[in-house]
Amino acid sequence: MNVVQVYAEEISTQLQHVLTYDEIVKLIEKPKYQEQGDLAFPCFTLAKKYRKAPVVIAQEIAASLRNPLFEKVVPEGPYVNCFLNKQEVSKHILQTILTKGEKYGSHRIGKGEIITIDFSSPNIAKPFSMGHLRSTVIGNALAKIAEKCGYQPIRINHLGDWGTQFGKLIVAYKLWGNKEAVKANPISELLRLYVHFHSEAEFNPDLENEARKWFKQLEEGNEDALNLWRWFRDESLKEFSRIYSLLDVEFDSYNGEAFYNDKMEMTVEMLHEKKLLFESEGAEVVDLSEANLPLCLIRKSDGATLYATRDVTAAIYRQDNYKFKKAVYVVGHEQSLHFKQIFLVLEKMGYEWAKDMVHVPFGFILKEGKKMSTRKGKIVLLEEVIREAIELAKHNIEVKNPRLEHKEEIAKMVGVGAIIFHDLKNERLNNIEFSLEEMLKFEGTTGPYVQYTHARASSILRKAELTGDETNGLDDAHGWAVVKLLMEFPTIIQRSMQLYEPSVIAKYIIDLAQEFNRYYSHVKVLNEDNQINDRIALVRSVTIVLKEGLQLLGIKAPEEM
Ligand code: ARG
């Protein structure tokens, strides 16, 4: 049940087709002040149709609305305000949550259809950047939210595993590399070789020629070149996998750029057939001036295909292979133009489904206001950052709860949860300031704060002898404030899906945790009176929703911390 729907239904029977049920749902709002009730229906739009003043219409509607879930319905100016029956509504909501458990808040909007989520997608032999971290965390949450909404997510890691840089790497490795060093520290060693190549090439232009030759060999399938490329890729992936396992993220596909090598010719041919390719300075391009976009480069004059060619090819492959209903790309906002271009190219190719593709951009991670860079020398090794967060979390636990069991495991949940929450709590397009100390605080708007609230509620439940089943509901003001939030969870999930915005859920669980802590400081939950079972029902419902909310963001909820 959703009280907005109940209210809308009641109003709808009064209005008899003047407004549709859906129109009524859209009009219903939350009154500004608690004293004005729980729901408000504005009558302005009705004035024209009824040829009456909204104030009069509000009075008429209010007089005839009755439902056991409503305590009273009163007109206030042009609004019809509804005061919900706290006891009845809370009984219903709490019972629903306790029966459904973690399934509370699920939707069937997705109808089991496929949504591909292209996220993380780091580049082989290069450090996993802060941008890739954001993409990983946001994409992972969106996959879970999509699943909760009834979609079937396909998680795709579109690895940057092809390009002329591999020619350079092969040359550098053959000249200055050694196997053990790469095995020990794949990314930093490969990066070192790459950087070294560039500083040497400044004085020795022959190196560039060598590199071009090797890349050509690679493209032509030379075994020696292929083996090295495969090895660089495997070693880099091993290192990325450690990060993914720390973050508890998995993928359904690691088909990266190289996977499309043998499929690109087909794309170019199709573009030709559809007469979409033009020659521009020897290169082949698609003209997108109709949308005021720059030319989309498909093939360079030397025959090489590009990032865009691969993405167009990948989209066609994914539609053929997965029949996606939606295709989402979680990539930084600096690539917005690229996605506009490839979506339009696909549309011009006549693909209906091009309209189902969405770029979900996000802002930068900053350190003291400056972009965190992974360029020469200044590399921030992500794995180290995550391990540091876990160490700090362990330290906090050591101070707060030295006798806690499974400290290591819980410190991991808290440290990783802190990083994820810090990323997801603000709208994704905002830049975020990176500060481990901030994100690990047990107070304020942090992951550990929500986890801590959940653990505290769990510990109340461990002490309780009742289960909260068969609750009669509550009618005190603090409990009601919590119930009202619990009631919103399904709508919150739907909104975060519509907006591709995990922050909607993050903000919500902060509100819920704060409201619950307020409740806890005002009410003696375990006091032996005739409402104890109902209060336990409330506490259990809160743990269920906090845990599920965290889960949707990719964060674990320990029972103790
Ligand atoms: N590897 C790219 C980068 O690091 C991101 C790829 C995003 N996905 C895509 N289909 N283009 O910038």
Image (spheres, rainbow, N blue to C red):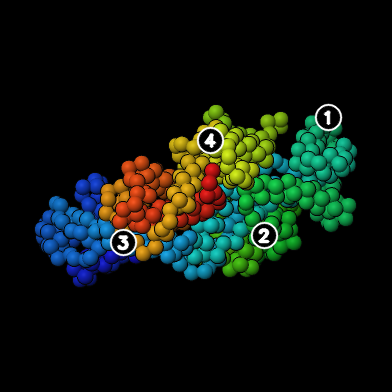
Find the distance from the CA under tag 4 to the CA under tag 2.
41 Å
Find the distance from the CA under tag 3 to the CA under tag 1.
82 Å
The amino acid beneath tag 4 is Lys
Q: Nearer the N terminus, badge 4 or badge 1?
A: 1
Q: Is residue 341 left or right of residue 99?
A: right
Residue 203: numbered disc: 1
Please name the residue that numbered disc 3 is placed on. Answer: 472
Please name the residue that numbered disc 2 is placed on. Answer: 253
The amino acid beneath tag 2 is Ser
Find the distance from the CA under tag 1 to the CA under tag 2.
41 Å
Q: Are marks 3 and 1 in contact (CB under 8 Å)?
A: no
Q: Nearer the N terminus, badge 2 or badge 3?
A: 2
| Foreground disc of the pair 1, 2 | 2
Residue at (81% x, 41% y) in the render: 184
Q: Residue 62: which quarter of the image?
A: bottom left
At numbered mark 3, what does the secondary structure look like: helix, strand or loop?
Answer: loop
Q: Nearer the N terminus, badge 1 or badge 2?
A: 1
Q: Nearer the N terminus, badge 3 or badge 1?
A: 1
Find the distance from the CA under tag 2 to the CA under tag 3.
48 Å
